[in-house]
Amino acid sequence: MVKSGTLILGVAAQLLLPLQLLFSVFLLLRGHDTPGGGFIAGLVAAGGFALYLFAHGRRALTALLRIAPRDMVGLGLLLGVASTLPAWWRGEPFFTAQWWTLPPFGVALSTPLLFDLGVYLVVLGALLTAITALVEIDQDDVPS
Amino acid sequence: MQALVLGGFVVSGVAPWLHRLMGGRAALLLALWPAAILAWLLGQWSGVVAGEALVSEWAWMPALDVSLTFRLDGLALLFALLIVGIGGLVLVYAGGYLRGHSQLPRFLVLFLVFMTAMLGLVLADNLVALFVFWELTGLSSYLLIGFRHTDPLARQAARQALLITTGGGLALLVGLILLAQAGDSWSLATLVTRGDTLRAHPLYPCLLAGILLGAFTKSAQFPFQFWLPNAMVAPTPVSAYLHSATLVKAGIYLMARLHPALGGSVAWTLTLVLVGGVTLVLGAVMALRQTNLKLMLAHSTVMALGVMTLLLGVGTRTALTACLVFLVAHAFYKGALFLVAGILDVSTGTLDITAMGGLRHALPGTALVAALAALSLAGLPPTLGFVAKEQVWATLLTSDPWGGVALAALVPAAGLMVAVAAIVAVRPFFGPPVATPRAPRSRPSSLLLGAAPLATLSLLAGLGPGVLDGLLSAALSAIGAPGEAPHLALWHGFGWPLALSLGGLLLGWLAFRHWDRLRGWLEVGLAPWVARGPEVWHAALGWRTLQLAEWQTRWLQNGHLRSYLAIILMSWIGLVGQALVVHHGLPGWPSSGIQAFEGMVAGLMAVAAVTACLVRSRLAAVAALGSMGFAIALTFVLFSAPDLAITQLLVETLTVVLLALVLFRLPHFTRLSSFRQRWRDLGIAGLAGGLVTALMLAVLDGERLPRISDWMVSQGQPLGHGRNLVNVILVDIRALDTLGEVFVLALAATGVYAMLCLRAEESSWSSPAP
Amino acid sequence: MEALLAVIVGILFAAAVYMLLRRSIVKLVIGLMLLSNAANLLVFVTAGLRRGAPPLVPEGLAAPPSAVADPLPQALVLTAIVISFGVLSFAVVLVRRAWELVRTDDLDRLQDTDR
């Protein structure tokens, strides 16, 4: 039931995934100024991957991701915790936001952005873990 | 001073290692630790006697006003000397007593932990630190009583002691907190200066009751006295150290320490004199009923503790002096006698006095120690016991109106103590030899090495009691009775005290001569009272508690989720509903415009929710939930929450994905509840929903406090550099919350993943599928 | 509108409680979903509603020129929505596993199936 094999869905998923991922990154980066942010962006990306999963199956998704969803969760938590530390290093209270501007491009980098990235990864990783887990149960159940 | 005290914990930690290294002799080496403290304490003697208190402060939890400040004044020095002095001797003794015992390392650890805790208890100046040490002594006492943990009797006695002393400890905690509230300080040194304020405080009866309960349970006062004789199943060094010389005196210490703060009121005097009087009479009578040497000594300890409580209750300066002298004398002779009992036990294999006799040839040293200590117990010259007893008589003869009552109880009791002393010192050692279970033979010299100094101290301190004058004077001024030093002397000349002593002696001699008959009479006569005594109350209370617990577990925790939920919800509805109606009244109906479109969205939500409950098909239920979710998303759009709307929409989509994956792998809806259950549940549900609505209306209706979010709105851009305020709150202002929430999400994912792993493990176990 | 939504939230709560009290394990999950939605809506509504004023600061300004909707409950509800989804997925997998192992959807019988 999982791998439908419909041509239209397969092609659509293939085409939509990059767009959805791009959109999610856009939402992530612009989230501080307009509606969006780590949670929403993570959900959008998870939706894209879920579509791909339905169209092409779990193996294809695993091959595409290269990194296990649960590692994504861990990485996200690590980023979230790491973003608390620079303030300490600067002698300010724990978790105080730090802002830097990288000179060559004028790109603003900040711990809230780092933190949002961590949130993004955790949301994406957690949802993908749940969904792939359920798909795996199914595939084990269905006698091939 | 902290290092000196808390170092004991470190020393106890290395004890097992030391034992592995050098076997039974480790106890001798470990005894150097209390000896070192003893030397240090003696070094402080002159300063403390001169009236200086040594204070060493150490903030522990400054924010809570809890410190580990130690204060060495006269009273603390007196107790600390007894603790480390007797502790060291008993440690030496225990090395011989438990030689070759496989659990000796455990004993050493517990013993040193107890000693350290006891030392901390008498030195602590902060109420919280005092309580912590107090409980630590109780805990180590529990473990030491249950040292022979394979014996069910030992386990039972240990549990009983733990329940009673920690039960009292709880009352003490309440009392100490109230004391700190009433006296506005956590420091003992400050509190003892505020006696008048405390005694006039409305909380005084409550805090006094709590503190006295704690002290009475610890010091085995009636009606809690029964745990102490039962605790005699512990190894004898424990009985000698914890249950006669130190631990049980913790309650006396506390009452003495708080005497200037709490003492002197009618409630204090009446309670202490009455309880102490009943305890001492009970202890004296019960002691004569025993044939087991340790039990006899234990009951006489109860009697001694009663005397000290009574003297504290009388509370005059001479009474306090008598109390302290008696305390020191008792620690010396009772410790020595217990150690003698232990020697007799290991030499002859019995503790039954009637089964011993004529041992003076086999154990001459022990007989001498026993005789010296018994002289002191009987209060005969030239021992410290005599000095103490004369002091007690002199006090009670001069103090009105309690002196007469106290004397009436004390003189016969003292007579009975003389009989006990005679029985303990004479029966085993003199008379014709009696065949004991084991042929008496001499035991390791370390046993006598532990016991002899205590007996010798009884004698020396009796010959020259003036040594104690300075220390007593310092201790008295620490407990609010300053003045010129008391002059202890062995010989006070002829007078009423001596006459009373002689009267007691006569009574004791008579009781000793006719002990066998007296014991038989007491055995029969007291049996019905013992069978209805406090120990039985305690047992019944424990049994009833278990019954109640079992009953309420069967009734409330029946394993049905829905009955738990129903009980929780009904309590919530009852309590919150009552509070709402009583404190707020029924909420009004705020008038605000409703646009037709919004009304439709809201209606859709309600209809979808109800549909989800009513339909019989899983798919329909999920569809209904989906439309409810989209209606909620629409509500978010309508009321200016774009982020929420997007999130809700995405989550709804993913929920559909999730449910599509599992829905048809789940069981069908089944109707399991009866018609009546459904209506009952509907009633609960309706009430809960109604209460939520009422609460929300009350909130919307009520006054608004200034919002914290106003600050967030105004500062979000300047400080957070973001124009989407929701996101600024999420990742900056309340980022710690978000971090926690992200962790929850990760936890849920881990749980899902773990269930997968579990499955893989199980499938490898299960038989291959057909 | 707040009052109307308060009534709706009450209905959602009632529906959630009713479903939670059922013996069927799937209905329990539905009750859980209803409950989380009801709770989110409760927080959102009791903070007060405002039409057409999202909590965004226009470009170039330090603060919104006029009053905006309260961003704090929105932030709280946003995380709650995502977390309730995480919890839902956990519950669904749990129910799925329980069904697989014990083949009963009667909560009353689950307690007898401890092995």
Image: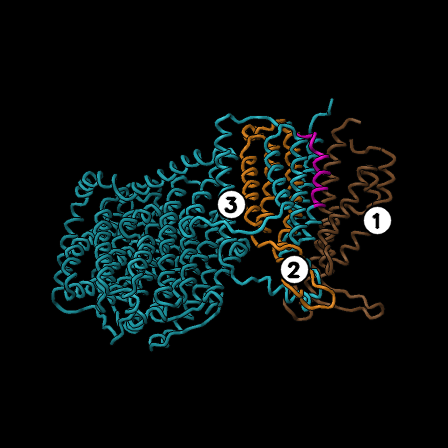
Chain colours: A brown, B cyan, C orange
How many other residues sit within 10 Å of disc 2, few (<14), some (14-19) or many (≥20)?
A: many
Q: What element carries label 2?
A: helix
Tell me, for residue A19, which label it has, or none: 1
Residue B376: tell me if it is visible: no
- The amino acid sitting under disc 3 is Val
- How far apart marks 1 and 3 lie (CA) works out to 43 Å
Q: Name the residue under label 2.
A: B729
Q: Name the residue under label 3.
A: B692
Q: How far across and down, in percent of the image, does residue A42 sit?
A: 74, 50
- The amino acid sitting under disc 1 is Leu
Of residues B572 and B292, the one drawn nearer to the viewer in this rendering: B572
Of residues B106 and B582, the one drawn nearer to the viewer in this rendering: B582
Q: Which residue is drawn at 62% across and 53% down?
A: C76
How many numbered marks are there?
Answer: 3
Q: Which residue is drawn at 51% across and 51% down?
A: B590
Q: What element carries label 1?
A: helix
How many other residues sit within 10 Å of disc 3, few (<14), some (14-19) or many (≥20)?
A: many
Q: Give the range drawn in magenta.
A: B649-667
- How far apart marks 2 and 3 lie (CA) works out to 27 Å
User: Going by the image, does B176 lie left or right of B205?
Assistant: right
Q: Is residue A132 magenta?
A: no
Q: In this view, does B654 lie above or below A99?
A: above
- How far apart marks 1 and 2 lie (CA) works out to 28 Å
Q: Hey, which quadrant is residue B401 in on the image?
A: bottom left
Q: Specify which label sits upstream in the sequence, 2 or 3.
A: 3
Of residues B79 and A65, the one drawn nearer to the viewer in this rendering: A65
Q: What element carries label 3?
A: helix
Q: Hey, which quadrant is residue A77 in on the image?
A: bottom right
User: Going by the image, does B165 lie left or right of C66?
Assistant: left
- The amino acid sitting under disc 2 is Ile
How many other residues sit within 10 Å of disc 1, few (<14), some (14-19) or many (≥20)?
A: some
